[in-house]
């Protein structure tokens, strides 16, 4: 194959492709650039981790892909289609986001049934009873949870509901922003294992944000390290495991990261 054909092939395999992304907040003198020239791609069925210290721009990248942030430039390609500033209906069937805090992300006065049915109603999807039951089973909750309220659930159970809600429209890509960091350590592994199983069973593609290197080592094949809005290093988890990162900031991060033990 000619090298340009190889490049084309690589592009065709990329489900999510971000090129030269810049993101800004505020206006005039207050305008601040939170993300600078960020580029990476995630292959179909892959899991890509975004790590870096607090304030480095990880959530901003995810929120911009989701369409929650308006002031950006660069290219966001999903399945080869370039995203506009506005996201259409089809977009939300392709890509969904799970947030850090399952307490804040579920409506306190809506039953689980209502929370899970809502995306189906919005998109005119039928078979709602069956789909809600199946979604609860998919995330390891029984159908008995259907008519409960969030306050009757543990943190881990709430995050399972948030994951189920994200899966209702059968998306291809999941944007996961610190999906376990608000949970007890004992529950974190359960949720990570659930996410790993779901990726395999439903052939999902993940973009996972975390500050925990042990989490990316467990969940991802490749990672990008962010510092002050920029990607300073992209490497495989294999390289990280061998503790061979090139960039001094990444080495610092490895040393500073509690709970990460290179093999
Ligand atoms: N809505 C906003 N308005 C103004 N500035 C913002 C807004 N959201 C984020 N920022 C700024 O953008 C920068 C990146 O923030 P971001 O939330 O993306 O960091 P992060 O890497 O996700 O951090 P953390 O690990 O703490 O979640 C920070 O300087 C932050 O203060
Ligand atoms: Mg964040």
Image (cartoon, rainbow, N blue to C red):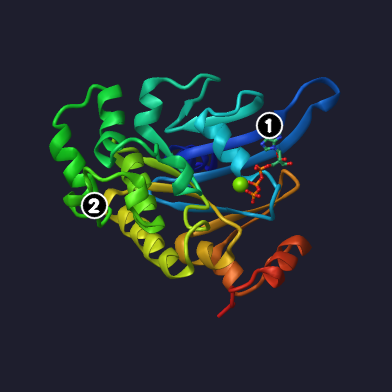
**Disc 1 element:** strand
In the image, the residue with mark 1 has its CB under 8 Å from the nearest atom of ligand 1: yes
Which residue matches tag 2?
Answer: 138
Q: CA distance from mark 2 to mark 1?
A: 36 Å
Q: Position of residue 186 (x, y in %)?
A: 43, 70
Q: Residues within 10 Å of mark 1 (few under 14, many from 20)?
A: many
Above or below: residue 257 compared with residue 157 = below
Quadrant of the image containing the C terminus: bottom right
Q: Position of residue 196 (x, y in %)?
A: 36, 59
> Is 212 positioned to the left or the right of 106 in the image?
right
Which residue matches tag 1?
Answer: 23
Tag 1 or tag 2, which sits nearer the N-term?
1
Q: Quadrant of residue 233?
A: bottom right
Above or below: residue 214 compared with residue 37 = below
Residue at 34% x, 38% y is 171
Q: Quadrant of residue 128?
A: top left
Q: Position of residue 21 (x, y in %)?
A: 65, 34
Tags 2 and 1 touching, CB below 8 Å:
no
Residue at 23% x, 22% y is 124
């Amino acid at each position: 194959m000619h090298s340009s054909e190889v490049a084309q092939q690589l592009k065709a395999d990329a489900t999510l492709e971000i090129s030269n992304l810049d993101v800004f907040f505020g206006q005039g003198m207050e305008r601040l650039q939170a993300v600078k020239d960020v580029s990476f791609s995630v292959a179909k069925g892959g899991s890509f981790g975004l790590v870096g210290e607090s304030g480095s721009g990880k959530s901003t990248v995810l929120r911009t892909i989701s369409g929650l942030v308006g002031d950006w430039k660069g290219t966001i390609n999903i399945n080869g289609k370039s995203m506009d500033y506005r996201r259409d209906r089809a977009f939300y069937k392709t890509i969904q986001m799970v947030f850090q805090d399952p307490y804040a992300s579920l409506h306190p006065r809506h039953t689980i049934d209502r929370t899970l049915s809502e995306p189906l109603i919005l998109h005119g999807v039928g078979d709602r009873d069956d789909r809600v039951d199946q979604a609860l089973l998919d995330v390891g909750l029984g159908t008995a949870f259907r008519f409960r309220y969030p306050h009757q659930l543990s943190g881990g159970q709430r995050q399972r509901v948030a994951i189920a809600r994200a899966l209702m429209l059968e998306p291809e890509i999941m944007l996961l922003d610190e999906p376990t960091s608000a949970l007890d350590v004992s529950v974190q592994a359960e949720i990570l294992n659930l996410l790993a199983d779901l990726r395999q069973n439903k052939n999902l593609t993940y973009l996972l944000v975390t500050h925990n290197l042990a989490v990316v080592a467990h969940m991802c094949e490749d990672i990008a390290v962010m510092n002050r809005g920029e990607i300073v290093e992209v490497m495989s988890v294999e390289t990280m495991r061998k503790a061979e990162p090139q960039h001094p900031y990444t080495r610092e991060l490895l040393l500073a990261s509690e709970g990460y033990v290179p093999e």
